[in-house]
Image (cartoon, grey):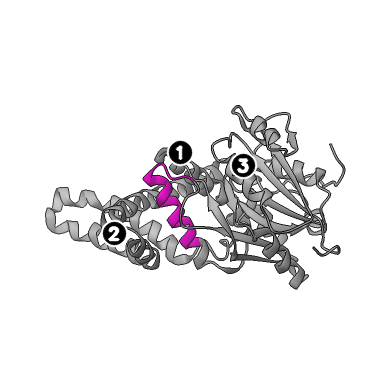
Amino acid sequence: MRSDRPLVTVIIPNYNGARFLPLTLKAVREQTYAPLEILMVDDHSTDDSVRIARSAGVPVIRTGANGGAAVARNTGARRANGEILFFVDSDVSLAPDAVATAVAILESDPGIGAACGIEDPDPLIRSSRVEDYRALQHHYWSVASEGEVSFLWSAMFAIRAAVFAETGPFNPRLRYTEEVDYGHRLGRRYRILITSAVHGRMGHDRELMTLLRKLFHRGRARVPLYAARRSLARGYETAARGWGAVSAALAVVTLPLVIPYGLAAAVVPALLFGVSLACDAGMYRFVLARRCPLFFLFFVAVHFLVNLVIVGGLAAGAAQWLLSGRFRALYETPAPAASRAGG
């Protein structure tokens, strides 16, 4: 083992992650990299998370109240001793070389501010088809974005402690878009990379409504950020996917044309639905190559709903942006200064 290796602190923000936590902690403890410090920050969980972590010998820091992932990550960063911080969500089981690979990427170029990982196409624990959908969809969109991006894949990423302190902590006011905001701030001075060389299996929502609710609020909360900066995030949110979501929504809007104009008018929503599929054809080919035709039909149906929810979230965000000055200023208040002191 090299004695000159930088100490890495693995920070695990957690809220009610007992279902996945044993696998997450096991994977962290089995990393090939050393020296390694492990900290779990429990964001006021109501399940068995704290007992699970302590029984595994992992130090636990507890927040005073549930403040969200941004607060948990900031809390861990304040208590970390490492020169490099590796953040991993409590529903991610890292590949054994994930930390070592991320450190090597950071050491290869001081201009790289963060090295982000990509989750595997299979869920960490499979118990519903919704989990399979989300694992495949998110994996493909992430792999298709591989390279330089403009916001963090916050589920697993490495960043130098000095760069984190320079950039400032995650904005504690944000619960759905803290990684987008952080990427915009970090990207002003450093490059952000996402790579499949750093990877692991991720847990996903089992219930469709839970997933759709999260996606709705993520879309809604992005509006004031993009309105202020007049740009979408580079990489994940492509123009083609945006048009795919819009086409799906227009397919629903034009469907009632069948009532006054008869079945011939069904060609309009049908064409729009086809456009929606064509806008992300690579993803659909990827899924069809991996799974059976029956699941593929399920995937298409769920992604159609996801597109509608994304458009709905953006529309709700636009209305809120017009009506609420507080919402427009959501990203304007600077986050408090980072500190390395314990607390």
Q: Do the residues labelled 2 and 1 touch (CB within 8 Å)?
A: no
The answer to which image quadrant residue 153 occupies is: bottom right
Give me the disc on residue 117: none
Asked if the magenta segment contains residue 339, the reply would be no
Horizontal side, residue 305 vs residue 211: left or right: left
Front position in the image: 263 or 34: 34
- Point out the stretch of residues depicted in magenta: 125-141
Q: Which of marks 3 and 2 is nearer the N terminus?
A: 3
Amino acid at pointer 3: Arg
CA–CA distance in space, label 3 to label 2: 32 Å
Which label lies toward us, 1 or 3? 1
For mark 1, what is the residue?
210
For mark 3, what is the residue?
175
Which label lies toward us, 2 or 1? 1
For mark 2, what is the residue?
273
| Rendered residue at 58%/35% (across/down) | 18
Q: Residue furthest front?
A: 1
